[in-house]
């Protein structure tokens, strides 16, 4: 596999090549096992490989052929960007190479194992694989003492077996390549022993084998050698200079040989770590103890300090758990005689949650169509926290309302998926924050914004603002006038939301009335409307978008034509064109008269003006007003009923013939009107009125003659009244029979044979009835009777000729017999009238 090839890049002695092949074979087998286990690829290479050295066939191990590489875009990514500088992948072959010299000691320090992890990212489809490269140690470092010379002062009374700590040598290599032991130059007094601490590190102790004699030998110089276990082994040396001092029987003694203390990494500089103490049984200067730190690495001496007098150990610089998790301090106690004692202080650094998680967005697929199925991968990201334990245990979540979900993958990687269907009309883009939070106390967190755009799909039909529109247009409008503007909105974008309007039908015959503009939706009138012909109609308008396939919806427009006052009132009764009587036997026109008895009291119904208006509403509300009369105070007309009644009692001084002119007005703006002329004859009976009418026909009377006639008529009426009273009294007195005068008065009024009466002309067309009586021997002309008004029907139905009951004759068809009122039967009583031949006929009120 590639591990073997990577090792062949570095020449080794013949003895090391066999071991290298074994290591490569084990790495190759390990890579196969890891590849079969899942999405993790593992390689093993030795350190110190040169730039361009082959690590392994990454594309082949991922199952990619060289032909697929341009499309799949294989590349390596990592949340820890400093690890990417060591490796690169070939775009042509897909093989993984070393980009920079690998120094295991620089990369991993004193760690027993060293590895680099990163991700291999391929696209089309998007996937991620985890690659783990183990860096194997090479014996490229020799053991090195912290100082080249050690000076010791040993009292001559020092007992054999006394031990003196010499510290330890440093070797950055690990395993067998690390420090294995110490050797001391041959001498008569001292030997060296190797001690191993709990952390596995080996340090040297100088052991006095034989008592010293300052008088025979004041100093001893020896060479101390440190050896590792490499092949070949490497070594380092230091010089020992041992000075023999005068007797100081009792060395200092620490209360404990080993101290253990824990310190949080956020402890401030100046904090007290520990207070060590030692005692000396001697007195005087030999018992005066001073404290100091022994020979230790520089980074330890930079962090801690000890007070020489009190033995208080304090912190000099800030700690970093992620850099070093523990320190071992060698504290020395020296008395005034030069004897020393040593103890170890093990400082454990406690992790503090001082590193927030780091979020790296690896890839984002944007925009996403709104019809993408749920579960579509839209983004890949990686989260890393430099802390450990719960402080480095990170949980990720999405903050914000968006149809997205977060699914954890291996190695701190996460996939962002669509959790439900997307809808661009509700949100054209989704902005969410990826929040990574560790489980420390207090918890730290970090966030990164993820923006996902949603592309449009034609999934919405146009929607009208109203399902049904109502428009009101006054009649007689101009062609092309705007009727209503219809607005339909489409929630889609672009061509999918561009709306066009079309006519899609409507009520019968409505299409020629209006047209619709395709872009704006404005409906225009194509012709002038006439309220009397068409009062309302309905059309349907379809709104269609420009999508493929297109979507549409339909709304209806109901157009109401408003009435204008363009029709004047039409008088049905009395007939139009009646200006006055023409007393001529050859006249072919008939003139209607109303006969009012002179005994009529105030409120007597003289007649009724009947009119209709083809308009509607206020334009058809009619009012009546009397504008001309010979005796204005004698008559009045109902404002709304049109009934002409006497305003006072009729007197003998009133002229026998009265001409009334009434005007009929509607309530339109401006108001239209029509006039009606009504002729009234004041007489007790028609026979009484005929002479007056004949005289009037012969010539007009002067005012003086008229006044004379009135006085004469009043006198005659008074005499007639007195005579009637007298005859009545005589009739009571003479029960045998009425006198001859009464018998004469009771005779048949129409004594002329052949007196004719029209058949049931009492069936009237007004709320009161009329009877027509004519002179004998004359033919009854056909009068122009008006069609019967029906107050309950609107004026337009009267104009249309369609009453609610039976069919009325049209104006051109001539008069027809109107139906009789069932509640008011009429009976002609010709005996009420005096028999008098006359060339005229006059309608009069019939008795009930």
Image (cartoon, helix red, strand yellow):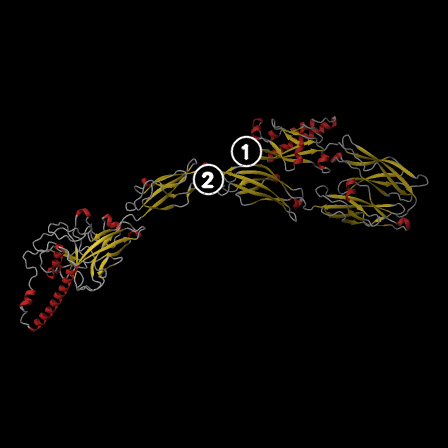
Q: Is residue 102 left or right of residue 218?
A: left
Where is residue 118, by image quadrant?
top right
Viewer can see residue 595: no
> Which residue is label 1 attached to?
125
Q: Is residue 234 left or right of residue 472?
A: right
Mark 1 nearby-residue class (10 Å; few <14, some 14–19, many ≥20):
few
Mark 2 nearby-residue class (10 Å; few <14, some 14–19, many ≥20):
many
Q: Nearer the viewer, residue 281 or 420?
A: 420
Q: Position of residue 314 (x, y in %)?
A: 78, 47
Q: Earlier in the sequence, mark 2 or mark 1?
A: 1
Residue extending furthest toward the bottom: 733
Q: Position of residue 735 (x, y in %)?
A: 6, 72
689 shown above or below 94: below
Q: Is residue 629 left or right of residue 438?
A: left
Q: Nearer the viewer, residue 794 or 747?
A: 747
Give me the disc on residue 325: none
The N terminus appears in which quarter of the rendering?
top right
Viewer can see residue 148: yes
Q: Nearer the viewer, residue 555 or 98?
A: 555
Secondary structure of the residue carrying tag 1 is: loop
Where is residue 319, by image quadrant?
top right
The nearer-to-camera label among 2 and 1 is 2
Q: Are marks 2 and 1 in contact (CB under 8 Å)?
A: no
Secondary structure of the residue carrying tag 2 is: loop
How many marks do you count on the picture? 2
Q: Nearer the viewer, residue 41 or 629?
A: 629
> Which residue is label 2 attached to?
492
Q: Position of residue 743 (x, y in %)?
A: 5, 66
- Between marks 2 and 1, how big is the CA–CA gap? 30 Å
Where is residue 115, by image quadrant?
top right
Q: Is residue 279 left or right of residue 796?
A: right
């Amino acid at each position: 596999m590639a591990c073997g090839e990577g090792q062949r890049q570095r020449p080794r002695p013949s003895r090391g090549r066999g071991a290298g092949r074994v290591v490569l074979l084990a790495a190759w087998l390990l890579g196969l096992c890891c590849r079969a286990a899942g999405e993790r690829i593992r390689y093993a290479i030795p350190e110190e490989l040169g730039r361009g050295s082959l690590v392994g066939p990454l594309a082949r191990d991922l199952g990619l052929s060289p032909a697929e590489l341009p499309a799949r875009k294989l590349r390596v990514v990592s949340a820890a960007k400093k690890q990417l500088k060591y490796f690169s992948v070939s775009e042509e072959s897909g093989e993984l190479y070393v980009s920079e010299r690998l120094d295991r000691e620089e990369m991993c320090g004193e760690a027993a194992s060293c590895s680099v992890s990163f991700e291999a990212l391929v696209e089309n489809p998007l996937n991620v694989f985890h690659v783990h490269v183990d860096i194997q140690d090479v014996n490229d470092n020799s053991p090195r003492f912290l100082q080249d010379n050690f000076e010791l002062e040993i009292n001559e009374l020092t007992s054999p077996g006394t031990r003196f700590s010499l510290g330890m040598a440093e070797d950055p290599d690990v395993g067998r390549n690390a420090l294995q032991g110490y050797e001391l130059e041959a001498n008569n007094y001292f030997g060296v022993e190797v001690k191993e601490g709990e952390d596995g590190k080996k340090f040297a102790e100088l052991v006095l084998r034989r008592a010293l004699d300052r008088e025979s030998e004041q100093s001893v110089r020896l060479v101390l050698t440190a050896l590792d276990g490499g092949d070949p082994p490497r070594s380092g040396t230091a010089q020992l200079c041992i000075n023999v001092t005068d007797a100081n029987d009792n060395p200092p003694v620490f209360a404990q040989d080993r101290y253990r203390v824990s310190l949080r990494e956020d402890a401030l500089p100046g904090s007290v770590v520990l207070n060590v103490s030692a005692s000396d049984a001697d007195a005087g200067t030999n018992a005066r103890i001073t404290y100091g730190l022994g020979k230790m690495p520089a980074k330890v001496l930079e962090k801690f300090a000890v007070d020489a007098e009190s033995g208080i150990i304090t912190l000099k610089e800030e700690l970093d758990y992620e850099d070093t998790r523990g320190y071992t301090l060698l504290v020395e106690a020296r008395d005034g005689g030069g004897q020393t004692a040593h103890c170890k202080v093990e400082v454990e650094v406690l992790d503090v949650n001082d590193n927030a998680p780091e979020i790296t967005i690896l890839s984002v697929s944007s925009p996403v169509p709104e019809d993408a199925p749920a579960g579509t991968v839209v983004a890949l990201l990686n989260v890393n926290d430099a802390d450990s334990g719960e402080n480095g245990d990170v949980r990720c979540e999405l903050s914000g309302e968006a149809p997205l979900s977060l699914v954890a993958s291996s190695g701190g990687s996460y996939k962002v998926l669509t959790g439900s269907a997307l809808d661009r009309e509700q949100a054209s883009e989704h902005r969410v924050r990826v929040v990574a939070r560790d489980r420390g106390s207090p918890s730290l967190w970090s966030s990164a914004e993820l923006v996902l755009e949603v592309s449009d799909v034609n999934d919405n039909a146009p929607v009208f603002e109203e399902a049904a529109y109502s428009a009101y247009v006054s009649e007689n409008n101009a062609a092309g006038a705007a009727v209503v503007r219809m607005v339909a909105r489409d929630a889609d974008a672009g061509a999918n939301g561009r709306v066009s309007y079309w006519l899609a039908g409507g009520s019968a015959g409505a299409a020629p009335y209006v047209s619709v503009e395709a872009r704006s939706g404005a409906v225009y009138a194509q012709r002038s409307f006439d309220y009397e012909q068409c009062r309302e109609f309905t059309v349907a308008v379809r709104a269609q978008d420009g999508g493929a396939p297109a979507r549409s919806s339909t709304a209806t427009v109901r157009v109401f034509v408003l009435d204008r006052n363009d029709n004047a009132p039409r008088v049905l009764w009395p007939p139009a064109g009646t200006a006055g009587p023409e007393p001529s036997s050859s006249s072919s026109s008939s003139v209607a008269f109303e006969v009012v008895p002179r005994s009529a009291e105030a409120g007597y119904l003289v007649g009724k003006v009947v009119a209709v208006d083809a308009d509607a509403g206020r334009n058809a509300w009619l009012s009546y007003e009397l504008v001309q009369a010979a005796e204005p105070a004698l008559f009045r007309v109902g404002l709304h009923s049109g009934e002409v009644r006497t305003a006072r009692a009729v007197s003998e001084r009133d002229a026998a013939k009265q001409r009334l002119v009434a005007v009929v007005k509607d309530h339109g703006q401006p108001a239209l009107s029509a006039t009606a002329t009504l002729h009234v004859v004041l007489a007790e009976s028609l026979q009484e009125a005929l002479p007056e009418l004949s005289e009037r026909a012969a010539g007009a009377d002067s005012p003086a003659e008229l006044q004379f006639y009135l006085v004469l008529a009043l006198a005659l009426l008074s005499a007639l009244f007195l005579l009637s009273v007298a005859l009545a009294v005589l009739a009571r007195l003479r029960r045998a029979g009425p006198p001859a005068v009464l018998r004469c008065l009771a005779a048949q009024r129409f004594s002329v044979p052949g007196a004719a009466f029209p058949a049931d002309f009492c069936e009237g067309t007004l709320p009161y009835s009329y009877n027509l009586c004519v002179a004998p021997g004359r033919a009854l002309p056909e009068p122009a009777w008006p069609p019967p008004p029906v107050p309950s029907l609107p004026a337009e139905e009267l104009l249309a000729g369609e009453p609610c009951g039976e069919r009325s004759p049209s104006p051109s068809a001539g008069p027809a017999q109107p139906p009789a009122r069932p509640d008011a039967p009429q009976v002609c009583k010709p005996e009420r009238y005096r028999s008098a031949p006359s060339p005229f006929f006059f309608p009069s009120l019939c008795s009930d």
